[in-house]
Amino acid sequence: MATQSASSHHDHGETYLDFASYDDSASATTILIHGVSASGSDWSLVQPYLCTYHLLTPSLFTQHSLKLARSLRESAPGSNGHLPQLSWQASYVVLMAALIRRYAKNGKAHIVGLSLGGNFAMALAAAHPDLSLSLFVSGLPRLISNAPALALPLAKHGIWATQRLIEMLPLTTHRKLLDGEVDADPGGSDGVGGKTSLEEVQIVVETVTGGYPVPTFEMTERSDTSEPSFRARVVAATRSKWFMLTTESSTWAIEAGSKFAGRPRNKDLADYEGSGCVDLKVFEAKRMFHPWNRQDPELFAKSIIATIEGLDFPAGDMREVLAS
């Protein structure tokens, strides 16, 4: 592993998310999008294995980044006094697209997302194919349609209380309960990693119960038939323990990936319009917990590189459950 040079960027007026940039001299950019209870520092164990790429690691839940996301939501037009129509997901997609246009090499990036960040990453690639070079996501939250209204505040406060109880555990106890396999401390100096705010939980609940489908990848910016198919890889980490129950499944990963690719789950429907636009593969990682970027950062990095370079995924660690 090589040592990386990093530069941090904070408080960009009213324009950009807080983020850090690594290996600025590399020729291609990868953006790493974290999940809840984390920040850009959550990628600290993965970054050294990706030293041949320019990395952007935004922190979505700093005071400044949240302020930007809120301002976009509040400026969205409402109707008849209703709440603004712009979702949290849409606001973060706008902000991350701006970050790529301004700081990524040639204004394009390979997109990586974990957990809620995977949902944002998939939406980003679908909305902006002109900015997207490839997509790797894991831990996609399962979307829920038509959730009872009373269930939403109960879910929000229940999730928040549970996570705060977990956060109160000493790190040594936390690691022991997970068989010592997960580094639960993202470290870093941005002051947000590892602590879950009620607003973060609200973002999760609103995103997964929004009732909208995973957006379809649009090929309007990739209409040249000589161009290779857009490469997308989805991984479901399905290992579970009583202390860390997984919500991931290969079934949902297949459904989400298929919606992203813009075709039915029946991959054998050869004449489906646009079926060749996305090179989609879905994998199951049975020995991985949900936050496996810190359980096996080298394997996580190898999976990212395999996606970017079009290589086979590490044999023995991943079971392929869908190939386009």
Image (cartoon, helix red, strand yellow):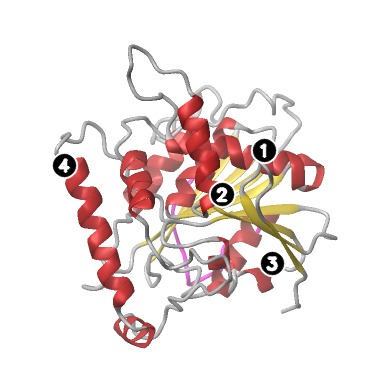
Magenta extent: 311-324
Q: Which residue corresponds to mark 2?
A: 64
Camera-nearest label, 3 or 1: 1
- 246 is within the stretch colored magenta: no
Mark 3 burial class by Cα count in 10 Å: few <14, some 14-19, many 20+: many
Amino acid beneath label 1: Ala
Amino acid beneath label 3: Leu
Question: First in sequence: mark 2 or mark 1?
Answer: 2
Alpha-carbon distance for marks 3 and 1? 23 Å
Q: Which mark is residue 98?
A: 1
Camera-nearest label, 2 or 4: 2
Q: Which residue corresponds to mark 3?
A: 50
Q: Which mark is residue 151?
A: 4
Q: Nearer the viewer, residue 151 or 295?
A: 151
Q: Position of residue 262 (x, y in %)?
A: 48, 30
Residue under the image location 38 percent in, 45 percent down = 203
Is residue 312 visible in the rendered structure shown here?
A: no
Alpha-carbon distance for marks 4 and 1? 35 Å
Amino acid beneath label 4: Ala
Residue under the image location 21 percent in, 31 percent down = 146
Question: First in sequence: mark 3 or mark 2?
Answer: 3
Which SS class for mark 2?
A: helix
Q: Where is residue 169 in the image (x, y as percent from the top left)?
A: 30, 79
Of helix, strand and loop, which mostly describes the magenta segment? loop
In this picture, residue 239 sits left or right of residue 92: left
Q: Position of residue 296 (x, y in %)?
A: 50, 75
Q: Which of 84 and 245 is in front in this view?
A: 84
Q: Where is residue 310 in the image (x, y as percent from the top left)?
A: 66, 54
Camera-nearest label, 3 or 2: 2
Which SS class for mark 4?
A: helix
